[in-house]
Image (cartoon, rainbow, N blue to C red):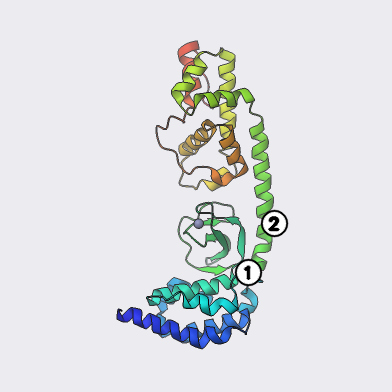
Amino acid sequence: MKASAQRAARFWKELLEEVVRPSVIVGFEDYYRRLSSWVIGHTQDFGAELLEESGLAVLARLDPSRYLSKSPEIRLDLELARLSSVAPKSMESVAMALSETLLDMVTVWSARDCPNCGGPMRIMVALSDDARRLFLRCRDCSHEEWEDFSRVETRVRRVLPATRGDVTGLHRAHAASEDRMAMEARVRGEAISDSFWDIIRRAEMRSDRLKRILWEMPEDEVARFHEEFVRASSVLRGSPFDAILDEAVSEDTLMDIAYWVVAQGREFYEGVLEHPNRIPRHVKGGDPAVMHHVAVEVFDERFGKELDFF
Ligand SMILES: [Zn+2]
């Protein structure tokens, strides 16, 4: 075993014996305090940088009477067994395991699952010089998003766990706005006719097939198809989808994504309206399902007329 691994193992054993084993009966608040003061007492061993990097610098200084979650998802009677099985091989792993343990005790979990991996998301507060802003951070992957679902572009550095007070307003606003937006989107989506979806189904996500189908149709029906295509896709370009597809997505990409979703057919399209987070984040250039130009082409080549793109 390398010296650093031996040191981490010794350190961990000491923690288990001195803090965790006698903590079984003290309750979460005392357990939190004991772990915190042990961390602070070993500042030299961790080093300031590691404490900062792992989040321990902040977590070890929180007041558990204010931050402790109502029902932490760990069990004190199983804590010794759980942490004994961790067996960290470096001081970095010691710091991460401690950081997660403390964080789990103070986390207020979001009702929303991670759109990236389905994992649970913690509600956190991002601190800047003049503002506190809530965001969600996935426990299992690196996904982070602001409370309006827009993606956090640069990893937030100065962070506090949210308290129940921070969150009360958020949850209400979240639930209400998500419901309302999904409902509005659905209502707008329902204005699309069955015959439109039938054409989309027969086109099998391929612009060449769609062209053959439209070629056989009378002028007014092609125009109607086009109008419905534009309407169905425009639903996907407004709220909440514009917030979900981060600012990095250009207006053109946003439209291609919307057209692509419509081309997948009714079931997929309505699934996205119902669960806005299912909207794809990008579409390959030249994907045959990007078929919005087809009606315009048919109008031009067959009827010798122009059809507005939008
Ligand atoms: Zn995730």
In the picture, the disc for residue 97 is none
Q: Position of residue 192 (x, y in %)?
A: 63, 28
Residue shown at 46% from the left, 61% from the top = 155
Which secondary structure lies at badge 2?
helix
Above or below, 50 against 198 in this view is below
Give the position of the N terminus as an image quadrant.
bottom left
Residue bearing the label numbered 1: 163
Disc 1 residue type (three-letter) = Thr
Q: Position of residue 117 (x, y in %)?
A: 50, 54
Residue shown at 55% from the left, 77% from the top = 79
Q: Quadrant of residue 108?
A: bottom right
Which secondary structure lies at badge 1?
loop
Which one is earlier in the sequence, the residue at label 2 or at label 1? 1
Q: Position of residue 206 (x, y in %)?
A: 46, 27
| Label 2 beta carbon within 8 A of ligand 1 | no
Disc 2 residue type (three-letter) = Arg
- Would you say residue 131 is visible in this rendering? no
Calculate the distance from the C-alpha at mark 2 to the C-alpha at mark 1: 15 Å
Q: Position of residue 307 (x, y in %)?
A: 52, 19
Q: Quadrant of residue 187?
A: top right
Give the position of the C terminus as an image quadrant.
top right
The foreground one among 235 and 23 is: 23
Residue bearing the label numbered 2: 172
Above or below, 151 against 104 in this view is above
The foreground one among 192 and 241 is: 192
Residue shown at 66% from the left, 29% from the top = 191
Would you say 91 lies left or right of 292 here? left
- Would you say residue 215 is visible in this rendering? yes
Residue shown at 58% from the left, 44% from the top = 276
The foreground one among 161 and 90 is: 90
